[in-house]
Image: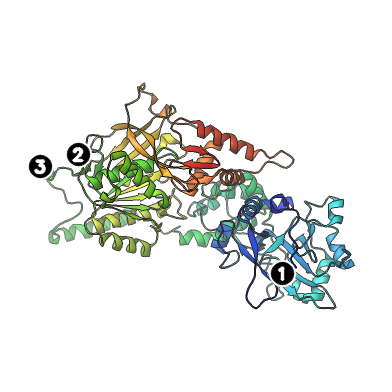
Amino acid sequence: MSNVVPLFPPIGDVRVPEPLRELPAWLVWRFEQFAGEAKPRKIPYWADGTRRHGTQGGSTDRDRLTTFVVARDAAARGGYDGVGFAPLADFGYTFLDFDKCVDGMGNIPAEIEAIASRTYAEYSPSGTGLRVALRGDLGNHKSHATPEQYGIETFSSSGFVTLTGNILPICDLLGYEDRIADVDEGTRALAERRFGASSSPTADPDDFMAGREPRLGLTVDEMQGYLSYLDPGMGRDQWLRVGMALHHETDGDDTGFDLWDTWSSEGHNYPGTEALRYQWESLKPAPGKRQVTMASVIKMAKEAGYGERKTPTPEQVLERVAEIRAELPNKSASRFGPVPIFDLVTGEPPRWIIKGVLPDAELGILFGASGSGKTFVALDFAFAVAMGLPWRGRRVKRGKVVIIAAEGGSGIGRRGEALAQHHGFDLRDAFDIHVITAAPNFLDSEDIAEVIAQIEALGDVDLVIVDTLAQVTPGANENTSEDMGRALANLRLLHTATRAMVLAVHHAGKDLSKGSRGWSGIKAAADVQIEVVRHEDNTREIVIEKMKDGEDGLRWPFKLEVVELGVDEDGDPVTSCVAVETEAPVRQPDEDRKGVKRRGRVENHILEVMSMFGAESTVPAIDLINKAADLLPAPEEGKRDTRRQSVVRAINTLSREKDGPLKLQGNLVIFYE
């Protein structure tokens, strides 16, 4: 370790070229010594602290690689030795890593100086090498240093490059801190001398069509039709392939960009129009390489169900009628067999778990905006059922409850402790509540089977709460019947197998007046839909939006009351919340929807970011500020970046709201979902 020169400038002050800052290609690294090795290795970690593993550019890698600011701040905060850039083929950049090319006087070979003096170049962490950034593709190659010559390595789509921000004096003098030049013939010649002619990407002589793939001549409507079957929240690799195909089909014009932008905006990882425009410009095809065409998108759409539904002709329907009519005398029962109305009257009356609130039925939806308190309401239901306590004066059938705490599972113990303290009982008496803290995938049959088996092993269960629907349907397009129909089918399967009523906690849409988020079939499938509303005056209500066999429109006002549970190791109070009944606010008849809490764009953005950390999260304020600012669209070129100031103002605004979703406690932000 003693021969390693510390990074300069300090990590928190490192800056890198502007074209690279917003690319999701950054990680952190540290020196680690391995037994039997003279020098420590540079070991990469993702910014969340997980050691990097798997395939470069794979879905896991792309999901965890981040932007420069996030990686830099994580490195400074976590005591890492630096930040690194992981080049991916679609970014279109190559880094040259020259090893042992700087002598004791700071001199470098003329051929390296010719390259480094026209683009961004900096010293390596050791101080004896150089990193040079170029736009283009030189492949991935390595030629080791010998006593006679320096080493050289190229990174275009593998590994990672450590960056120090310690810019070469000539580049600093020329103002090249943000300049990345194209690969030129001199650089290619040097690479060919060291690696051979294969280092220069040229067209494959056996593949004449490489780089000349024909367009399909699709109309805008046809391209939109294919995109409508694809989930914009898909993995980054596939998402980029869609962009590449649109770029190719439209020759990179704004028609293709607008299609990609509109489609991408429905995904949970949408970076914003400005960031997407930058990505679009990087999709220019490399010479001699095969291009992704709309044929790939069409294949993806067909795999998602495009073209499978064929409407039968009227003649075919009537033929089927004749077949069914012939079978009727031999059929003992039919789903659509008419029965006398009196037979329906003599059936059993509706059964309830919480009378008038939760029916003993198949499926319920409990939804609300971020910060409305829906998780606390769901837990209030759970404890009432498990303890057999009346809920708001209504009869409750005591039973066993399972909570699938897929969002914020680590905090559910504190929330339960707060409820027990508020109601004056020992949490150990709530032995009929069981919690699954992992997040199963309700689109995966193996996960569903295991969840059902585990719940069945508990014996008779009356209520299963799934918190939240979004967390158990990763990557699903909430606006399509394909994905959500599959999720709903598995929710019903959970009920069929366990006979428990399934209550799924869900998010409200951006337009609160339109109810729960996503496909309209979600509401149609539910036996009950309950909304948790937070009004402009900070009062909250539980509202029965839909009750299949009961009364709609019932409402119960409540507030979130903070409960102190003790102190942590630093002497700071540990708190949680409980949903407590209050008096109904006085409202005019037309105020129900107008009174819904409206917040600004940045305030809503912060609540969405906090929800990523989970319900009832406690997060260092600086982490929230950095993440929220980084996920906002970057300013236009030449304009001042005010994202951090906007985020700080919005956090302060939210924290001052009476009974609001955020509380500031020293340097910490506490989120009450």
Q: Residues within 10 Å of mark 2 (few under 14, many from 20)?
A: some
Query: Residue 330 occupies which quadrant of the picture?
Result: bottom left
Where does residue 146 sit, x and y in percent of width and height? Answer: 81, 78
Residue occupying the point 69% across, 50% down: 12
- Looking at numbered disc 1 in the image, what kind of residue is underneath it? Gly
Distance from disc 1 to disc 3, alpha carbons, whole Å, reads 78 Å
Name the front one of labels 1 and 3: 1
**Which residue is denoted by mark 2 in the rendering?**
395
Residue occupying the point 41% across, 49% down: 411
Disc nearer the start of the sequence (3/2):
3
Where does residue 592 sit, x and y in percent of width and height? Answer: 38, 27
Locate the C terminus and report the quarter of the image it occupies.
top left
Q: Are marks 1 and 2 in contact (CB under 8 Å)?
A: no
Name the front one of labels 1 and 2: 2
**Which residue is denoted by mark 1 in the rendering?**
139
Left or right side of 343 for 583: right
Q: Compared to 324, does 379 lie above or below?
A: above
- Looking at numbered disc 2 in the image, what kind of residue is underneath it? Arg
**Which residue is denoted by mark 3 in the rendering?**
342
Q: Are marks 1 and 3 in contact (CB under 8 Å)?
A: no
Q: Compared to 196, does 542 lie above or below?
A: above
Disc nearer the start of the sequence (1/2):
1
Locate the N terminus and report the quarter of the image it occupies.
bottom right
Left or right side of 37 for 393: left
**Helix, strand or loop for disc 3:** helix
